[in-house]
Amino acid sequence: MPFIRSFIERETLRRRDFLLAGAYGLGGLAASSVLPTKAIAAEEMAVAWSYRDRSNPYWNSIAAGAENFTTDTLGRKKEALTHLINEGSNAKSLADIKSFVAKTSGKCAIGCDPNDSPNCRPVVEAVKGGNGYITTIWNKTDDLHPWDIGDNWVAHIGWSGLEPAENTATLLCKAMGGKGGVVGLGGIAANIPAIERKQGMVNALKKFPDVKLLDYQAADWDTTKANAIMSSYITTYGDQITGVFCANDTMAFGAIEALRAEGLAGKVPVTAYDCASQTLEYLKKGELLATVDQNPYWGGGVSLALAYYAATGKFKPSDEPKAHREFYGPTILITKDDADAFKKKYVDSMPKYDWSDFWGPSNGQIQYNRY
Amino acid sequence: MPRSLSNNLLRQFVPVLVLIALCIAFALINPNFLSVKNFARIGILAAPTLLVAIGVTFVIIMGSIDLSMEGVVAFCAMVFAKVFVAYGGFHGWGWTALILAVIVGATVGLVGGIAQVWLKIPSFMSSLSMGYIGLGATFVLSEGYRISVEDPIFRSLLTQRVFQMPYMVYFAMIALLFALFIERFSVLGRNIFAVGGGEEQARASGLNIARIRALAFAIAGLFYGLGALLSVARVGIADETNGSNMMFTSITAVVVGGTSLGGGHGGVLNTLVGTLIVAVIGNGMVVIGLPSYIQSGVLGAIVIVAVALSTNRKTIRFIK
């Protein structure tokens, strides 16, 4: 008797729980179908840009160019561009891109800096596996080419650091009077731009036998680290330092501040690279000698445009010559005299770019084994 | 004197001995290391880190840990820079930004402390999360741009010197004295040591543990704000990287100085020695010309040796 009663009670409770759970489930389904869903419309190709961080103005310009393509050419809202920020981690870069490709089911066009050269292959293979389209900039290994992977890897844009860095280093040596000691602050050692710019400096120094390279250390593109290393250089070499070569602007700012602490800002020539937003002020004050602009605004926009137009079928990458799939972007050397004109043309107003003119400003096909 | 007592006495001075030994070693390889100018440079490098490390010392003495410094320093630096520049620097009302940065730091610290106490989550997680929130808030404030602070009166912290030491070193010394006062002569300082030495006994003695915890985190935040000011003074720029690498250097400085991570032992003077050791190593490695790719390895090795020498293995029963 008691067994039967407890059995019936138990079964009643179980059935009641089952009915309640079923009601909740159906209610939940109904509620979620009422909420607006962010489904990607079948016609809309998703766009994204994957880059390191937002503390470097270079990446801000890249993002700005890509946003301009999204708003002016594609006619969408600025927020339609997805920013995949990897903060210097290869693993995060790859994971973000994989999940973006999966979320959009391959209907995506991506602009990307793979963060360092070994990471390029996994990234482009992941995008190819998901049937998305990607254009990379800066980092890839020498033996990997877009035509080996196929149409999904539309193009790779590099900016040769070799010749422009040689030019800035030459300017530096001339400002030093052709003799003295140079200290160098380099970027992250595995980054291609860091390697090329250092080599450009080394090539320039060969032309000035009386200029000695005292030291060259990696400050990882970071202002604070460059500041600390420059301080220590001043202790080690003191008055022997008559020139400073920095592989980018943000490190040059740190170096200039270290010089300022010694009262030497403006007295020791410093060269940099990248043309960040505050660089022009330093140039005009005479604390920075020269920098090189690589037009990241154009780079960000054109790489996204390449991926987008390939994805939507406007052109077929494999029909294009190799020089259109691996090419150099434009560079401009800027000194104190050029600063005002540059500011008027590229900073106070942005020139209007025809984003479908991919290869017009190109500087030629990428070359290897130059050093 | 009984052996254990003299050993203890010796152990308290080990960090200072390590510092002196390092200075001698570096000076032997490159005599330029011992110049007053180089000490000034070490001072400039160490000053912001010292303030952040002092902040963290209070939390570590209490037995918790605070990993929020990178985010809080960046956030305070950004708030300071924006308000300072917007109100015209020292010509206008911009100087109030100095006080604002400190208040913001203390508030963020207090919020983190309250979160830790109220939600009963480990301080490791609550502080790490507050740090990331701070970093995110910095991005939102800065919109990705960096603010440069060029007011010459503010930059005089770096550029003007008394007895060849820049103002920021004296600023850090005054803050250190303030911290020493809190540690030695205030009820809160005593209570922090009590909680760190034995939380159950402290609670049984009638201390309000929650209030002490929250206040300790607030003090830490206050010192992070001061550290942020010096960090901006040093590079003249406020952006997300103002706090970069501070987590490692400040906690290393605290531990190398002899403060136990378990709590209850140590003090801000220990932290001063620890910060100097870390700064001397960083500066010394470049001065002696050590190739940059082995510097991280050497730094780690020296830190392990310094911590091993200053830890009293007999009184600490288990190393976590």
Image: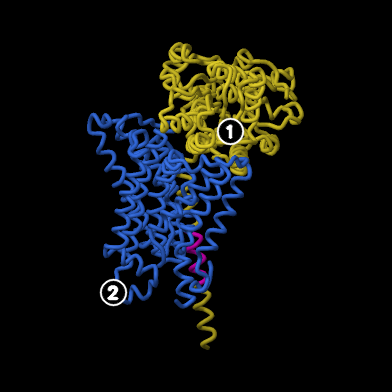
In the image, A274 versus B156, the foreground residue is B156
Q: Chain of mark 2?
A: B
Q: Which mark is residue A187?
A: 1
Q: Residues within 10 Å of mark 1 (few under 14, many from 20)?
A: many
Colour given to chain B in the rendered image:
blue
The answer to whether residue A236 is magenta is: no
The image's mark for residue A365 is none
Q: Is residue A206 above or below residue A143?
A: above
Q: Which residues are magenta?
A: A14-24
Q: Which residue is mark 2?
A: B206
Dot 1: what SS? Answer: loop
Q: Tell which subunit mark 1 falls on.
A: A
Colour of chain A, in one word, is yellow
User: Which x, y percent locates residue A351?
Assistant: 49, 14
Give, as a three-letter code, the residue at label 1: Gly
Q: Quadrant of residue A90?
A: top right
Going by the numbered disc 2, the residue's amino acid type is Gly
Q: Which quarter of the figure is the C terminus of chain A placed in?
A: top right
The residue drawn where x is 74% and y is 28% is A145
Question: What SS does tag 2 mark?
Answer: loop
